[in-house]
Amino acid sequence: MQSSQAPARPANAPARNVVVVGTQWGDEGKGKVVDWLTDHAAAVVRFQGGHNAGHTLVINGKKTALQLIPSGIMREGVACYIGNGVVVDPTHLLSEIERLEAAGLNVRSRLFISESCPLILPFHVEVDKAREALRETSGSGKIGTTGKGIGPAYEDKVARRALRVQDLKHPDRFAKKLRELLDLHNFALVGYLKGTALEFQPIFDQAMKAAEQILPMLADVGVQIHGHNVAGGSVLFEGAQGTLLDIDHGTYPYVTSSNCVAGNAAAGSGVGPDKLHYILGITKAYTTRVGSGPFPTELDWETPDTVGYHLSTVGQERGTVTGRARRCGWLDAAALKRSVLINGISGLCITKLDVLDGLKEINVCTGYLLNGQRVDILPLDADEIVACEPIYETFPGWEGTTFGITEWDKLPANARAYLERVQAFIGAPIDMVSTGPDRDHTILLRHPYKG
């Protein structure tokens, strides 16, 4: 590792686009990193997920929680886009806009929404909640959804029956499609999920009222991104959740309903993969997970005076959206190796290093015992992951604090050794280290926009 920063790009350098993705089970601290990098971007694009994802930003000591709107909204003059890969709850979107505007932010003139985004409507939420309740009572096991209708909305998209933002432009068309879709979901709600049918008129009226405010923000997002690049403006693509929650590559079925990997930044926003120039993977210095699913390095995080409890409390590990406590464990570098492979990671940002301050020993999982054999990368089958016994390398902790440090050479020697071993094992460089929640608590080794 080198402590020097990369030279600044020439003033006439072509646009350089960066994708930020989580490499674990989400909650890695992507929002802070996106906010930090937005200084170098003309636009920020959210390309998948819905308001089940949350980013907490701390700027000058003040916390701001975002769920659907890109983190770049915190920077004046930056355009923010919600790409076609995102599912949008109109009521929540407007509520989030109003909350940010009440805090003094200029939102509506800078936020643009793809008209191809599928809509989340009230029956999606009811189906989502009813399914989880049924799983719990039947003993089949809850998946751990947020109950916000994300999965059912994506199902309608794939089934080619979704109502999309563009349908809000045509009330008659919207009404016809809504009646058909509502009949389908009411049939499932009443006949199988033992719920209550929803009525057409309140849903239609609510959607039309929201349309009055949403339609002025519609945009052809792919064309707009291309325009920024042609004009020399760089773009930042912001992922939600994490790689191990990806619908194809995660711990299925304990996953989200969208593709969280870097490749989906192209499909989820309307540009070609040649426009993705640098992939930044965000990784905690340990591992957390919200909801159900396998977690090989999980520790006891509920009992006081344990390492897991230390990670949970010092790291303030609660979900931004749900408030649920996050399960905590040691860094799983074997799982991280899988994420590096899937995403084509150019460089990593390690977050929350300061949470490890004060621990006498620190473990890193570098493989597993599975059916008597050693494997050094996370398996693809969730049942096999459950059977994995982690193999650890142990490192000595360090004295003092890493909180707020902004230079690599000022980190304790043991902290540097820990990070260097992780880097060597996974085969990807650590380009940034976050040592606290504020945007300035960052060590920069190679700049994604200047490297």
Image (spheres, rainbow, N blue to C red):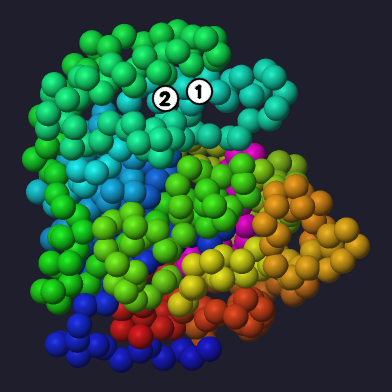
Task: Report if the CB atoms under discs 2 and 1 are less than 8 Å apart.
Answer: yes
Q: Nearer the viewer, residue 328 or 94?
A: 94
Image quadrant assignment for residue 333: bottom right
Q: Which residue is mark 2?
A: 125
Q: Position of residue 2 (x, y in %)?
A: 49, 91
Residue drawn at (34%, 40%), measured in percent from left and top? Answer: 87
| Residue kind at label 2, given as amino acid type | Val
Which residue is outermost to the right? Answer: 372
Left or right: where does residue 316 sit relative to residue 99?
right
Q: Which residue is mark 1?
A: 129
Left or right: where does residue 344 sit relative to residue 136?
left
Q: Position of residue 433 (x, y in %)?
A: 48, 73
Q: Is residue 30 visible?
A: yes
Q: Nearer the viewer, residue 154 or 320?
A: 154
- Element type at mark 1: helix
- Residue 287 forms part of the magenta stretch: yes
Q: Position of residue 142 (x, y in %)?
A: 63, 30
Q: Position of residue 439 (x, y in %)?
A: 36, 64
Residue drawn at (10%, 74%), measured in percent from left and top? Answer: 231
Q: Is residue 98 visible?
A: no
- Element type at mark 2: helix
Q: Is residue 92 above or below residue 438?
A: above
Left or right: where does residue 256 sit relative to residue 65?
right
Residue drawn at (47%, 77%), measured in percent from left and top? Answer: 347
| Residue kind at label 1, given as amino acid type | Lys
Image quadrant assignment for residue 254: top right
- Residue 71 forms part of the magenta stretch: no
Task: Pick the quarter of the image with the C terminus.
Answer: bottom left
Q: Which residues are magenta?
A: 281-292
Residue drawn at (49%, 73%), measured in percent from left and top? Answer: 344
Q: Residues within 10 Å of mark 2 (few under 14, many from 20)?
A: some
Q: Nearer the viewer, residue 192 or 333?
A: 192
